[in-house]
Every structure is written in structure tokens, then in C-alpha cells.
Amino acid sequence: MSKTITLMELGAYHGVVVAEGLVYTWGYNNQGQLGDGSTANKFLPVAVLSPILSSKNVTAIAAAGYYTLALTSGKYTKFC
């Protein structure tokens, strides 16, 4: 099943995309930068099911170093 990617960013050793309204992350996760509540590395995209992002329209994302940000409702939310 393929999804349409609307946003993509790359950090030092991780990536983040928005596809069909959901945020997906993958890569190294030693600082929890993937936002899945763990520090386990993920080498395939995993949906971020954070309550911070639920029911919100993500309009921009940023990734760098060991963090990931999402822009929702006009302000940045650090979710990882």
C-alpha cells in the first residue's frame, strides 16, 4: 500500500515524513527523536501516534540533530 508524502525532512540520523495526514519517522532513536515513546532504532517508517499530534493538521516539520518538530495550528510542537 503506497501513501502520498506531502512533507519530508532529514535529521542527523533520522527522517520524518507526513503522509496522508500522519507523521512517520525512522532511523536512529538514541535520544527518543522518533517520538514513538522508545529509544529503539527503527529502520522502516513508523507512524507517530502521539496524543500531542492527534486530530491536528501538521503543516510543517523539521528535523535536525536529535530532535523532530511539527508545526500545528500555528505553533511548533516538539514531539520527539
Image (cartoon, rainbow, N blue to C red):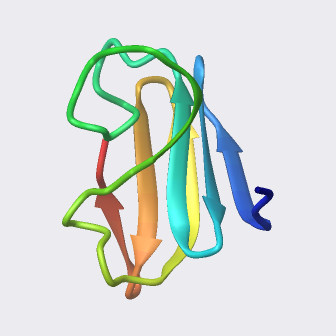
- What residue is shown at x 33% (from left), y 15% (from top)? 40
**Picture quarter containing residue 27?**
top right
x, y percent for residue 59: 56, 77
**Picture quarter containing residue 35?**
top left
x, y percent for residue 45: 59, 37
Q: Compared with residue 75, is residue 50 higher up or lower down, i.e. above or below?
A: above
Residue closer to the observer: 30 or 12: 30
- What residue is shown at x 59% (from left), y 17% (from top)? 13
Which quarter of the figure is the N terminus placed in? bottom right
Judged left or right of residue 33, residue 26 is right
The total number of labels drawn is 0
Q: Compared with residue 46, is residue 52 higher up or lower down, i.e. above or below?
A: below
Judged left or right of residue 72, residue 7 is right
Judged left or right of residue 26, residue 80 is left
x, y percent for residue 10: 67, 35
Residue closer to the observer: 51 or 63: 51
- What residue is shown at x 40% (from left), y 78% (from top)? 72
Which quarter of the figure is the C terminus placed in? top left
Q: Compared with residue 12, is residue 55 higher up or lower down, i.e. above or below?
A: below
- What residue is shown at x 42% (from left), y 53% (from top)? 69
x, y percent for residue 20: 64, 73
Q: Compared with residue 78, is residue 20 higher up or lower down, i.e. above or below?
A: below
Residue closer to the observer: 71 or 49: 49
